[in-house]
Image: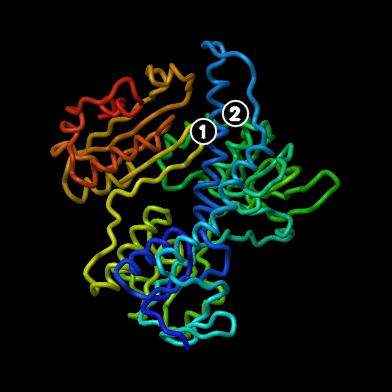
Amino acid sequence: MEHFDVIVIGSGTAGYTAAHACRKAGRSVLVVDKQPFGGTCAMRGCQPKKILVAAAQAIHGTSALHGQGVDGESRLDWAALMRFKRDFTYSVPERSEQGFLDAGIRTAHGLAVFSGPNQIRIEKKGYSADKFIIAAGAVPRKLSVPGNELLMDSDGFLELDALPSSIAFIGGGFISFEFAHVCAQAGVRTTMIHRGKSFLRGFDPDLVTRLMEAGQAQGISFLRESSVKQIDQDEGGLTLHISGSDQQTLSVDKAVAAIGRVPDLADLGLDSAGVEHTPRGIKVNSFMQTSNPSIYAVGDVADTQHLLSPTADMEANTAASNILRGNSVHADYTAIPSVVFSIPALAAVGMSEEQAHAHAEQEGIQLMVNAGDASEWMSSRRIGQKHAAYKVILNESTGTILGAHILGHNAGEMINIFAMAMKFGLTREQLKSLLWAYPTHISDIKYML
């Protein structure tokens, strides 16, 4: 049985970060993955998604400026866009694995199954290690209804060779909104179906309403408090049977189950390793250590609050540091921004208004809530943006920011400024005193404070 100092299960952003940190410190490291190397973000998530979104944004931006000095029609060439996307994703596995090998990290392909507290099997070969880092990621959640095999998931959507003339997205979260806006800009008849009352739960409801208005203006239909109970195939495509809506059936060419992702725990043999887990993921402490002291879990496979690439990297660095120097570094989830890359984008960091009011009551502080429509600001008018808004929540006495919520072009960049301010305790007065580069969208922050 071959032995390593550290074995990393998963080759995505978390696994990559942890493996290289351990190898740089002189540890012998093996990385194993049952899928092509590279992970969700680079292969099936953040990066390829953003390639599609960028093209859709360009189409939208051009059409928004019609009559403002721009003429002519632009269209989304899906086949060319997918070729461009694949130029990136197809090279990821080879580049990722070569990066490991160049660093002196061993690699293996196949399903890693724990056969004991410090042992795994890959195919028929056994390996042992002093420490393990599980960074196996997540997979699309399946919709458990009759006919679910007729649905695509987000992975399938990212590999479509041609767009259908009509499509439905089942789910009301990030994935549905981002892909729905791409489809709408391509001229696809697009419907979003969500069983809950509120779309994009966790984001400011006032700004979500504005975003849905923007989506409707682009031709997206929204069915709320509606559940798909069955999917049938017919000559024209699919028939979705819906409950809770006045519309009892919906006929579309394609449908996507976009109801989130679940930790990829299947067949890992966690019980054999004494690793406690739930459907939400592997239980970890603030050191990213599992119930087995020799095993750490990071990224989407861990039961933590934020399932984002930046937090996966942070957790991987935390786990690696604790393996190398003993448990001394805690995972830090302070001021983690989230962005929906819709058109326009919706971004948030910190407390919601509801959370802030509960916090203020508990702590005996006064809030300042600055909210408004930004669609008439020059930064919006010059690009033809008709849907833009903001809400910034502050501690009135200290001037520090408790939460920020932005809808509009460049929201994903702007929210980073608020995250930085919250992380380091900057006040509204300090931010307002900055001489921002002007005219930029980020310079609008001073008007939001």
**Residue drawn at 58 percent across, 60 percent down:** 141
Above or below, 36 relative to 193:
below
Q: Quadrant of residue 317?
A: bottom left
Decide if residue 235 is on the left or right side of residue 45.
right
**Residue drawn at 36 percent across, 79 percent down:** 5
Expressed as whole percent of the image width and height from the top left, the position of residue 305 reads: 38, 58
- Taking the view exactly as shown, the residue that stands out farthest to the left is 397
Mark 1: give few (<14), some (14-19) or many (20+) Cα within 10 Å. Answer: many
Whether tag 2 and tag 1 are in contact, CB under 8 A, the answer is: yes
SS for tag 2? loop
Which quarter shows the C terminus?
top left
For the residue pair 164 and 279, the one nearer the viewer reads as 164
Above or below, 386 relative to 133:
above
Q: Which residue is mark 2?
A: 218
Expressed as whole percent of the image width and height from the top left, the position of residue 68 reads: 52, 11
SS for tag 1? loop
**Residue drawn at 62 percent across, 60 percent down:** 142
For the residue pair 117 and 172, the one nearer the viewer reads as 117
Above or below, 331 relative to 26:
above
Q: Quadrant of residue 332?
A: bottom left
Decide if residue 35 is on the left or right side of residue 427.
right
Q: Which residue is mark 1?
A: 343
For the residue pair 266 and 83, the one nearer the viewer reads as 83
Task: State the scheme by which the image is colored.
Answer: rainbow
* Mark 2 to mark 1 CA distance (whole Å): 9 Å
Amino acid beneath label 2:
Gln
